[in-house]
Amino acid sequence: MKILKMISFNENTHSKFKSLKFIDLFAGIGGFRYALNSCGADCVFSSEWDKYAQNTYYENFGELPYGGGIDVKIHYQ
């Protein structure tokens, strides 16, 4: 975390990320979310299958990530 705190963003950089929304797939404990949130971006969905990582993510952000796999159904014609 020391490295993340050393990186500083000016007001111009922060305003560019203000309108950015993202999803946090394979979220782990939330490192990617932490970085984007610190720039002003907004996480709209998170997913993590590991229950221990989910618990840590919840402690870090107050949200429990979706825990199941994501099913994609492809229909061929």
Image (tube, rainbow, N blue to C red):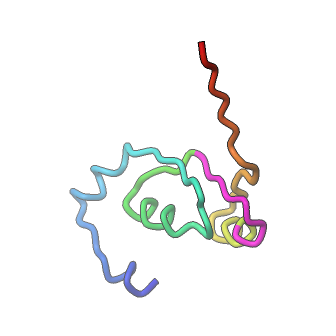
| Residue 1 drawn at (x, y percent) | 46, 83
**Residue at point 68% right, 62% down?**
62
| Residue 60 drawn at (x, y percent) | 63, 70
Residue 2, by quadrant, is bottom left
Residues 76 and 14: in front is: 76
| Residue 7 drawn at (x, y percent) | 30, 77
Residue 4, by quadrant, is bottom left
Instruction: Confirm whether the magenta stretch covers residue 76.
Output: no
Query: Does 62 sit left or right of 18 as displayed?
Result: right
**Farthest-out residue, top:** 77
Query: Does 18 sit left or right of 28 as displayed?
Result: left
**Residue at point 37% right, 61% down?**
39
**Residue at point 69% right, 55% down?**
65
9 to 5, vertically: above or below: above
**Farthest-out residue, bottom:** 2
Instruction: Confirm whether the magenta stretch covers residue 48.
Output: yes
| Residue 5 drawn at (x, y percent) | 38, 81
Q: In which quarter of the image is the C terminus?
A: top right
What is the span of residues highlighted in magenta in the rendered image?
Answer: 45-53
Query: Does 64 sit left or right of 9 as displayed?
Result: right
